[in-house]
Amino acid sequence: NAPAIAIVGRPNVGKSTLFNRLTGRRTALVSDMPGLTRDRRDGVADFGSHTVRIIDTAGLEEAGAGSIESRMREQSQRAIELADVVLFVIDARDGVTEADKAFAQIVRRSGRPTILVANKCEGRAGQDGFFEGFELGLGAPVPISAEHGEGIADLVDDVMSAL
Ligand code: GDP
Ligand code: MG
């Protein structure tokens, strides 16, 4: 059984971009579960000698019952429960938001091995937000740029160490 890596975080931080970067877009839409998980995406990636499953989460674009917050929490919680390692992504250009703090609480409570990922760290615009990441109580953020492919090798190393 391949270990599962879940990518969670509030909308627009770059989760799907990171998913595509890690999987090389070798993805499959998960269609067997309606509702909340309709647009959850499963993919595979080769991390060195290990094949891992990558789970992207979204769900917020889907119409349905419940507040956005409760649905976000439910979908993320399900992915976190399936995960051997959680990648909790923040947007270093935005800095830490209230939604990030709420997510951090969910992730911490899960007790799952978690790597805090500060995305959009290319250039200087992400510097302040990167340092704000320390406030989340999840250790040092790992700076990456999912879009530009920066920091990905170090992130993969950290995931391997956490497995
Ligand atoms: P998601 O909602 O968390 O899945 O975020 P997406 O992957 O859809 O990305 C949201 C937006 O952030 C898109 O416009 C991306 O192009 C942009 N984005 C993703 N990664 C990066 C990055 O590393 N740097 C910058 N500057 N933008 C990024
Ligand atoms: Mg997405």
Image: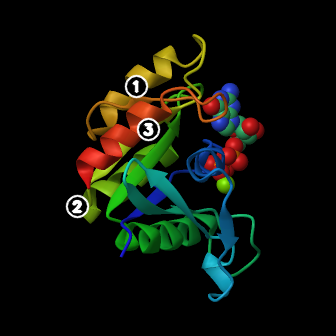
Residue type at numbered disc 3: Val
Q: Position of residue 10 (x, y in %)?
A: 56, 50
At x 51%, y 28%, the residue is 95
Query: 34 or 17: nearer the eye?
Result: 17
At x 53%, y 27%, the residue is 92
- Looking at marks 3 and 1 on the same chain, the residue that comes earlier in the sequence is marked by 3
Q: Read off the residue under disc 3.
A: 117
Q: Read off the residue under disc 2.
A: 111
Tell me if residue 104 comes above or below residue 6 in the rendering.
Answer: above
Classify residue 80 by image quadrant.
Answer: bottom left
Q: Secondary structure at mark 2?
A: loop
Compared across the picture, whether 51 is left or right of 113 comes to right
Q: Is residue 76 visible?
A: yes
**Residue that protrudes farthest toward the top in the picture:** 124
At x 67%, y 33%, the residue is 147
Q: Is mark 2 within 8 Å of ligand 1?
A: no
Q: CA distance from mark 2 to mark 1?
A: 22 Å
Q: Is residue 102 visible?
A: no
Q: Quadrant of ligand 2?
A: bottom right
Q: Read off the residue under disc 1.
A: 132
